[in-house]
């Protein structure tokens, strides 16, 4: 939670904050994520406006995951920018707080609660959207052999003489025919004395 009391409600007031916070749990996708024990560094700019507090910031966090091509572990640094408006709770003429569930359009609006705001949902959205969907250890990673799983980066000449199973029976027939032709090949040794 972040406090906006020092900022005040005067439009145009500005405050800058830098914090290091523990990374929220499960911050990432299946192949790459911010480790649960990591620290996220956040630089914030809080600006008071008529409707509430405009929060602009940058989050920096370590990433760990695996290459989607060769499955080798990889480590990266992520930088994600975000901007979000946290609105003041609306009060009616009698000073009562309006019902926030009264309007369906209000559901997506983030509000300040006693001058405090929770940055975790905004941070989670910004980081997940900035993650590479298919992280690779290097741009030209050749990946793994689809037949045996060998790392192609370690053996660039790796290959298999694969026969399409639809043609395998014909390959066996071709081998039989070639073997038969070798047995029936006439000898080229000159004239046969029995033919005379």
Image: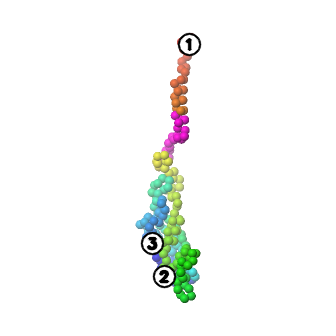
Q: Earlier in the sequence, mark 1 or mark 2?
A: 2
Q: Which disc is residue 114 wearing?
A: 2
Q: Which disc is residue 195 wearing?
A: 1
Q: Nearer the viewer, mark 2 or mark 3?
A: 2
Question: Label 3: which residue?
Answer: 20
Q: Tell me residue 187's x, y (percent).
A: 54, 20
Identify the image quadrant of the C terminus.
top right
Q: Would you say the residues marked 2 and 3 are in contact, meaning their CB atoms lie under 8 Å apart?
A: no
Q: How many marks?
A: 3
Q: Earlier in the sequence, mark 3 or mark 1?
A: 3
Around disc 3, counting alpha carbons within 10 Å, would you say few (fewer than 14), some (14 to 19), or many (20 or more)?
some
Around disc 1, counting alpha carbons within 10 Å, would you say few (fewer than 14), some (14 to 19), or many (20 or more)?
few
Tell me the residue at 52%/32% (across/down). Answer: 175
> How far apart are the two marked residues, 1 and 2, measured between alpha carbons?
117 Å
> How far apart are the two marked residues, 2 and 3, measured between alpha carbons?
23 Å
| Residue at the limit of the structure toward the left, as seen here | 37
Q: Earlier in the sequence, mark 2 or mark 3?
A: 3
Tell me the residue at 47%/57% (across/down). Answer: 66
């Amino acid at each position: 939670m972040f406090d906006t009391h020092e900022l005040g409600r005067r439009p145009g007031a500005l405050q800058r904050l830098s914090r290091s916070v523990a990374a929220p749990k499960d911050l990432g996708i299946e192949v790459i994520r911010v480790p649960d024990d990591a620290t996220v560094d956040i630089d914030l700019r809080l600006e008071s406006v008529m409707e509430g507090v405009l929060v602009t910031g940058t989050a920096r966090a370590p990433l760990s995951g695996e290459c989607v091509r060769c499955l080798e572990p990889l480590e990266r640094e992520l930088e994600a920018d975000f901007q979000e408006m946290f609105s003041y709770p609306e009060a009616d003429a009698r000073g009562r707080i309006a019902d926030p569930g009264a309007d369906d359009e209000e559901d997506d609006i983030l509000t300040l609660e006693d001058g405090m705001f929770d940055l975790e949902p905004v941070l989670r959205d910004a980081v997940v959207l900035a993650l590479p969907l298919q992280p690779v250890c290097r741009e030209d990673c050749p990946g793994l052999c689809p037949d045996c799983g060998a790392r192609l980066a370690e053996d660039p000449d790796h290959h298999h003489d694969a026969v399409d199973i639809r043609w395998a029976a014909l390959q066996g027939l071709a081998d039989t025919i070639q073997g038969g032709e070798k047995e029936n090949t006439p000898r080229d040794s000159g004239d046969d004395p029995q033919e005379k």
